Structures are given as C-alpha cells and as structure tokens.
Amino acid sequence: MHPLLINSLIMKIITINSGSSSIKFKLFDMPIQKELLSSLVEKIGEDFSTILTTINNQKSITKIKLNSHKDAFKLMAITLKENNIKQDDISQVVHRVVHGGDFFNSATIIDKKVIDKITELIPLAPLHNPSNLLGIKKAQSLYPNAIHIAIFDTSFHQTLPNYAYRYAISNNFYEKDRIRRYGFHGTSHQYILSEMSKILKKNKPNLITLHIGNGVSATAIKKGKSIDTTMGFTPLEGLIMGTRCGSIDPSITIFLAKSKNLTLDEIDKILNKESGLKGLTDTQDMRDIINLSKKGNIYHLAIEMFCYAIIKQIGAYIATINAKVDAIVFTGGIGENSPFIREKILEKLNHLGIKIDRKRNIESKTFINKKSSKIKIAVIPTNEELQMARLAFNYTKDNNV
Ligand code: ADP
C-alpha cells in the first residue's frame, strides 16, 4: 500500500483537466469527498491569462501572463503552498484523458506503457490527447511521489455492444484503423448514473442521461451500463452543440471539399468550431440565443433545431433500452440551468406519458415530473472532477495500491 494511504485516513487528491489553452485543477479530501480548492486557468500563452480560484466558496479572479502549461502548474503549486498544502500531502494526481481508444475501460495508473498508448491515440484526438499528456508530464515532475492516475472520457462507453459501436463501412477500417464509436463525456454520464442510483435507491437503473452544455451528448444506460451514446469516433457526432454541427450527411464534407475548394483542415475547423449554435446564430451562448429568440427569426429556429435533435434521441433511446426507463436526467450548463429548454424538449414527449411539472421545473428541483408521469425526469448538476477523484480513490482501494 502507498505510504500516504497508510499514514492518513484522509487523502488529498488533485484532479487535473489540461486543455490546449486552459487547465482546471481541483483539490479534494477523500474519501469524505470535500472540495477544498479549485482553480480554472484560461488563456495560457495569451497577453493575460485569467485565473479563477475558489477556496471555501470564496471566489477570486487574477490576471497575469502565463507563457506555458509549465507556468500554470508552478502557479498551482504556489497556490497550494499558500494554503498550507505541501507537495508530500498530495497522495494522488488524477488526470482527465479524452481518448483512451478501446484500451482502457477503467481508472489506470500512469506508467510508461500508458503514456505510450495515450501517445499512440493522438491521431484519434489530435486536439485533446497532446494537452492531456503535457499536463501529465508537468504534474509528474511537480509531484513525483504521488500516484498519477488517468481517467478516460471513453472508458464508461466501453460496454457498448458491437452493433452500436460499429459503423457500416469496410471491416478493414475497424480492424486496421480502429474506426468505431467510442463516445465521450463518459465521466459526466457515469457521475449522473452514480448519483441517480443513490437517489432512486436502485443499484443498476435504466436511464437516459442528457449532458447539455457547450458539448452535448446523450447516453442510453441499461442495468447500469452504457449501451449507446451519441458522440462517436470523435465528439463531433450526435446532437447539435455550441460550435459543433453534430450528425450531418457525411457527403456534405465531400461536397465542401470539391465544390468550394476547401481543405480538410478548413472543413475540420468549420464543423468543429464554426457550426452548431454558433454557425446558425453567431453566438454559442444559449442564454443570448433565448433572449434574442422571436418566432420566425434564426435564434428561434436554432432553439427548435437544438431541441428537436434531443427529442428524437430520447425517443430512440426509449426504444433502445427496451425496458422501463427509470429516469431521463438533464445535466450540463444548459440542462442544469435552463427550465425553458427542458420544457421545450419535454412538452413534445407528453404523448409518451412523460409529464413535466412546470413549477418544479422552474425551481430546478431534483425531480421535475408530475407524479402521474410514466418516466421520472431529474435535474442533476454534473461534477466530473469529483467523479474522477472517486474513481481514482476506489481504484487504489480496490487494488490495494
Ligand atoms: P462546457 O460543455 O464547456 O462545460 P457548460 O456545461 O458550462 O459548457 O455549458 C455552457 C452552456 O450553458 C452555454 O451555452 C451557456 O449559455 C449555457 N447556460 C448556462 N446557464 C444558462 C441558463 N441559465 N440558461 C440557458 N443556458 C445557460
């Protein structure tokens, strides 16, 4: 057993989500699941980086220039020190890694082999895995005595059956190139599953989980396992998102390349960064879109399209689960905070016996369905970092690390 686990019943765990220009750190006391500190560093490498720090519910914002991830990690260590957290107090550092391919289906201790696999998977997640690796490298040099653990966005969806994860293209593309549905947002869907299991007092519930934020994905969970999810080979597939188009006819990309002479990189940027709500309305912020929406204008149409895609998906997943659905759950920035969008989606499912309680919805209660509703409807704030800390803590406990 790791010495720090023996020495103290309470462990300090840092979670790290290292992106290309931003890093989110959180510090937890485990197993009591207390969040002690969080810090969101944005705009690394720009003229001014912003650092939003929350300690004991007190928020503060600072602006300084941080040239690189190395600077951001140094700043994290200083912030921890100022709060009397020494280097050796940290027993685990938990890293979010976006793409684990079909190699990783649970929390994994990071060693050379794991680093090599994450590196091998870069072609599948060129925007994410390199920044995740950079974070791992920097944190390992700052906290050499801690156990470093990777949590993959894809792991929770490794239970998908092959008929749900295969695409109907040549076998070779699957066998040689690993082209298949992987699914993402796994940590969030899994957190919702664990919260709902407690609330429903049911070990392995059937759920439709809707993560509706800038990124949007739905997952069908049957008997506590992900059996289908909307994001695919990359996070681009599926529902309409802040800047991603979601599912479109693949021929559109060929048409754009051929008839508009666009390069593949240009098309990639258009579909990932300039489409979705932003492509339709010029803003990706759902609050602005709702405020500007009037029947007949583009903001109104964007909301109709956004909700329509989710309504269709809920219908599909009710069929996919093929058993009583215990709850439909809303989470993510929009799912948690917009009664308007929730109602727009749910009012179209009335004929299936799904009945929203308007008052409970406006108050964002945990359950927002009428008693007579055939399926419960819940609103649960997601907490990916806490889920990462839980998965890492349980992994070391279960494996006697
Ligand atoms: P990310 O996927 O980047 O984590 P979030 O989950 O924070 O994003 O979601 C961001 C989205 O949530 C934005 O479109 C924002 O406008 C939307 N949002 C936040 N609060 C509200 C609200 N009260 N009503 C509608 N949309 C909201």
Image: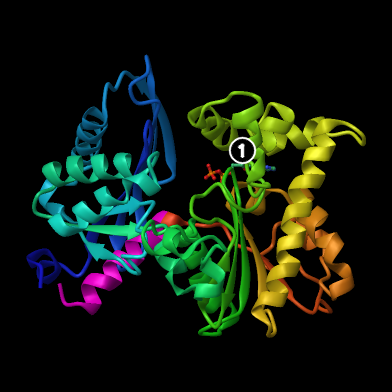
Q: Is residue 130 left or right of residue 328?
A: left
- Residue 226 visible here: no
Q: Count of labels shown?
A: 1
When the figure is inspected, residue 80 is found, relative to residue 110, above or below; the finding is above
- Residue 112 visible here: yes
**Callout 1, which amino acid?**
Thr
In reply to whether residue 390 is colored magenta, the answer given is yes
Of residue 283 and residue 146, the one placed in the foreground of this image is: 283
* Residue bearing the label numbered 1: 253
Determine the image quadrant of residue 261. Answer: top right
The percent coordinates of residue 151 (x first, y second) are 33, 59
In reply to whether residue 87 is colored magenta, the answer given is no
Identity of the residue drawn at 49% across and 50% down: 234
Farthest right residue in view: 295
Determine the image quadrant of residue 360. Answer: bottom right
The percent coordinates of residue 369 (x first, y second) are 77, 70
The percent coordinates of residue 112 (x first, y second) are 13, 55
Q: Which contiguous range is marked in magenta?
A: 385-401
| Predominant SS along the magenta part | helix
Of residue 354 and residue 199, the one placed in the foreground of this image is: 354
Q: Is residue 368 left or right of residue 335?
A: right
